[in-house]
């Protein structure tokens, strides 16, 4: 307090509080992770998922859940799909695919992929893969700049002719 008893003014400028750093999201691995059930990642290509026992027939009453990493790159490429139509189903983005998997090619999965088989009639199953991320489009080659024309010399100004007396 100063001599008059009034509070002292806050020194100027008042320092701002230090902002906390903005969290940086972890980079996506672009992976599919089997969380539950007998589905598996292919040994020959970790971008691919296999139904249980693929390429042999899957069994009755099976279920799998596969988590798709957030920001996972790559739409689905169907290498093989053969399930009991209407009963043994792969669910991607809430859509059900069965039989020959019609419509699954090119789907960009998000969240979870779910596999279920019922109590009868098994098939070979499925092998689906993540398509590789598209290559960046190459930029067109830089064209050479058009040369400027050589400027013509500016003629020197001539002194004005003064008439003779």
Image: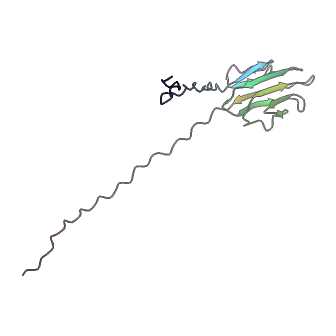
155 to the left or right of 6: left
> For the view shown, which residue lies furthest in the bottom direction?
165
Near-viewer residue (86 or 29): 29
Magenta span of residues: 39-43
84 to the left or right of 24: right
15 to the left or right of 124: left
> For the view shown, which residue lies furthest in the front direction?
4
Asked whether the viewer can see residue 50, the reply is: no
Q: Is residue 40 magenta?
A: yes
Residue 37 percent coordinates (x, y): 81, 18
Near-viewer residue (118 or 31): 31
Residue 43 percent coordinates (x, y): 69, 19
Asked whether the viewer can see residue 64, the reply is: yes
Residue at position x 38%, y 54% in the image: 146
> For the view shown, which residue lies furthest in the left direction?
165
Residue 62 sits in quarter? top right
Magenta segment, prevailing SS (helix, strand or loop) = loop
């Amino acid at each position: 307090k100063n001599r008059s008893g009034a509070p002292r003014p806050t020194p100027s400028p008042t320092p701002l509080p230090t902002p906390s750093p903005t969290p940086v999201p972890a980079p996506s691995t672009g992976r599919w992770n089997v969380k539950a059930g007998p589905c598996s990642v292919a040994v020959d290509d970790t971008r691919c998922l296999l139904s249980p026992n693929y390429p042999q027939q899957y069994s009755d009453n099976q279920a799998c859940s596969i988590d798709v990493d957030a920001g996972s790159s790559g739409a689905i490429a169907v290498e093989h799909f053969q399930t009991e139509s209407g009963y043994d189903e792969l669910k991607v983005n809430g859509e059900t695919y069965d039989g020959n998997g019609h419509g699954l090619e090119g789907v960009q999965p998000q969240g979870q992929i779910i596999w279920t088989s019922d109590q009868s009639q098994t098939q070979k199953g499925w092998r689906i893969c993540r398509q590789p991320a598209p290559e960046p489009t190459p930029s067109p080659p830089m064209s050479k700049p058009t040369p400027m024309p050589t400027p013509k010399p500016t003629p020197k100004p001539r002194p004005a002719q003064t008439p003779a007396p």
